[in-house]
Amino acid sequence: MAKIRESKSARKERAHQILSILEHSYPNSRIALDYQSPFQLLVATILAAQCTDVRVNMTTPALFEKYPTPQAFIDAPLEEIEKQIFMCGFYRNKTKSIKGASQALVERFGGEVPRTMEELLSIPGLGRKSSNVILG
């Protein structure tokens, strides 16, 4: 049985149609994570792996008050961040990911969260799913 290949333009058009249907079906959809900046959303998506959004939202207000910037996370001892995010599970790995992401943001992106998939995927701790959430 021969496979029919879809052209890039046809695939793009189909994706737009699907997106249109989803937007019509779910007009008020929003991210369940609470955040006030792209950086906070980036950290929240790292914390959300294998954790509920409710638990992440319980953790992040105090976390972001204590560490409001990528540089604040870089400067913080691992153990302090681990204590703050313990409730989210996998806290050691998530702490390393947050610190690595913060380092990448400061060193390569001037402390700002990039706006392309390729750049986001280059940041430690971010995969395609988190990057899609960040890009909206």
Image: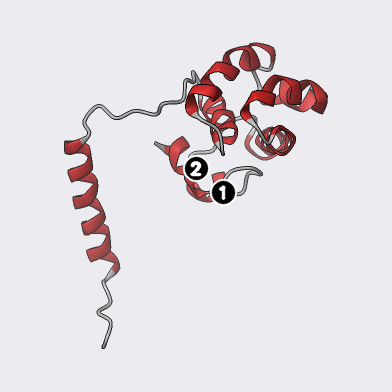
Along the line of sight, the residue nearer the viewer: 69 or 61 = 61
State the residue position of label 2.
Answer: 131
Q: Left or right? Give the position of 52 relative to 10.
A: right
Q: Which structural element holds mark 2? A: helix
**What's under tag 1, amino acid-wise?**
Leu
Q: Position of residue 26 (x, y in %)?
A: 22, 34
Q: Which mark is residue 134?
A: none
Answer above or below: position of 102 versus 19.
above
Q: Which mark is residue 121?
A: 1
Query: How is the model colour-coded?
Result: secondary structure
Q: Give the image quarter of residue 68.
A: top right
Q: How would you rate the neighbour count of disc 1 (Cα within 10 Å): few for under 14, some for 14-19, many for 20 or more?
A: some
Query: Which residue is painted at 18% across and 37% down in the image?
Result: 25
Task: Kindly tell me whether residue 116 is visible in this rendering.
Answer: no
Q: Which structural element holds mark 1? A: helix
Q: How would you rate the neighbour count of disc 2 (Cα within 10 Å): few for under 14, some for 14-19, many for 20 or more?
A: many
Along the line of sight, the residue nearer the viewer: 125 or 108 = 125
Q: Position of residue 74 (x, y in %)?
A: 76, 27
Query: Which residue is painted at 26% across and 72% down in the image?
Result: 6
Q: Tell me whether the residue at label 1 lies in contact with that at label 2, contact meaning CB atoms closer than 8 angstroms.
A: yes
Q: Give the image quarter of residue 75.
A: top right
Task: Kindly tell me whether residue 35 is visible in this rendering.
Answer: yes
Q: Position of residue 114 (x, y in %)?
A: 54, 38
The C terminus lies in which quarter of the figure? top left
- Please state the total of marks drawn on the protein image: 2
Along the line of sight, the residue nearer the viewer: 15 or 85 = 85
